Amino acid sequence: MRLAFVHDWPQDPGLAAALQERLKEKQVIARLPAKIRLVAGADTSYRRSLQPGVPAVAVAAIVVLSFPELQLVEVTCRATAAPFPYVPGLLTFREGPALVRAFEELTHIPDVILFDGQGLAHPKGMGIAAHMGILIDLPTIGCAKSRLCGIHDPVPATKGSSVVLRHGQAIIGAVVRTRAGVKPVYVSPGHRADIEGSVALTLDLCRRFRLPEPIRLAHQAAGRFCPNPDETG
């Protein structure tokens, strides 16, 4: 698939934050498609270099499944060097280059993509699901295992329960219990998605585990893909 928007990947955190501000103008919050036939999950793992001064390798995986059957349709994995430091709120600049390469190899265009990370539930509203959604111009959802910002009430222990996540006066997502008695996940729209639809689809995709099946399978695929240093490009 071809990206709808491209930009350079700055290595300076200040320049990266400024780019997030400019991208915010392109973000669209809208209802998810009425018909969803293909869903995808995206996740990134890391392989640390044993050589001093050599950056870690980011391994990005994208898994496409049929919906609602959740049968495997396609998997792509790509790896790149990840010289950008870990900075809370700037995760995309560390993982984005590998994700872009993985998306470029996809032959099936998913209707919705879920990311292991934030969307709108980000200090600037520009988590990895939002940022990547703008680049590929497809509906995207962030489903994170931990909170980056915002406050919320306690989540009831029953499966399917949710409470709103607020940042200041704005509702930026929801905290969702995908399994009874298990820690909730933080769901927020990325691009061309809405909170209500994002929560409903996330619950539809959590069949047996805490995480939605596309993200869970993408995490497994990224963990299995172990390139040699000369394969990182």
Image: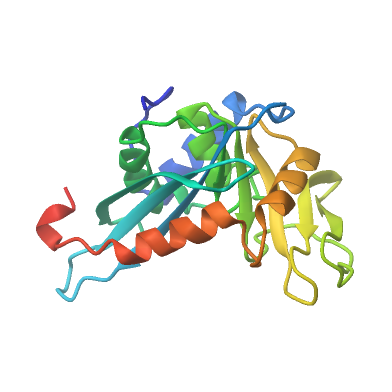
For image coordinates 56% across by 35% down, the residue present is 21
Where residue 34 appears, as percent x and y from the top left, is 72, 26
Q: Quadrant of residue 195?
A: top right
Residue 23 in sight here: yes
Where residue 218 appears, as percent x and y from the top left, is 45, 56
Q: Is residue 164 left or right of residue 199?
A: right
For image coordinates 47% across by 54% down, the residue present is 91
Q: Between residues 82 and 21, which one lies in front from this camera angle? A: 82
Rendered view: 135 above or below 64: above
For image coordinates 66% across by 26% down, the residue present is 28
For image coordinates 76% across by 39% down, the residue present is 197
Q: Is residue 2 left or right of residue 114?
A: left
Q: Between residues 171 and 175, which one lies in front from this camera angle? A: 175
Q: Between residues 88 and 230, which one lies in front from this camera angle? A: 230
Rendered view: 223 above or below 10: below
Q: Is residue 115 left or right of residue 178?
A: left
Q: Quadrant of residue 84?
A: bottom left
Where residue 127 appears, as percent x and y from the top left, is 57, 47
